[in-house]
Image: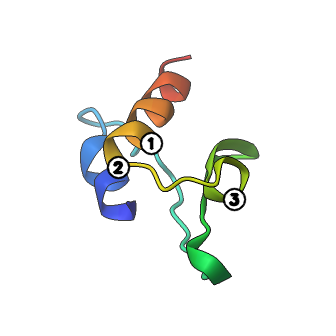
Amino acid sequence: MAEALITTFRPSVGQPHPIEDVRLIPSGGGRYEVMIGDELVYSKAATGQHTTNEHVLALVRERLVD
């Protein structure tokens, strides 16, 4: 997931990378969350479902465009 985020969202020439921080924090039961700043983008704990990289990338893309 981290690699997909970093390679999908590339900086424009002369601009900083649009994703300034990626942290992987181990958790039990395969749970994970994806956040942009303080905003929760996706939570496996909340949905109870594993998702695809493509789904999470689309959710992140929506928020980066805003």
Image quadrant containing the N terminus: bottom left
Residue 9 screen position, x and y as percent:
32, 40
Q: Which residue corresponds to mark 2?
A: 53
Q: Residue at x 40, y 38 (%)?
A: 55
Q: Residue furthest top?
A: 66
Q: Residues within 10 Å of mark 1 (few under 14, many from 20)?
A: some
Q: Secondary structure at mark 3?
A: helix
Cα distance between the residues tagged 2 and 1? 5 Å
First in sequence: mark 1 or mark 3?
3
Q: Is residue 6 visible?
A: yes
User: Residue visible at 76% across and 46% down?
Assistant: 38
- Given residues 47 and 64, the one toward you in this image is 47
How packed mark 2 is, by other alpha carbons closer than 10 Å (few <14, some 14-19, many 20 or more), is some
Identify the mark at residue 45; answer none if there is no mark: 3
Vertical relation: 65 (above or below) 27 = above
From the viewer's side, name the closer residue of 4 and 53: 53
Quarter where residue 3 is shown: bottom left
Check contact, mark 2 vs mark 1: CB within 8 A: yes
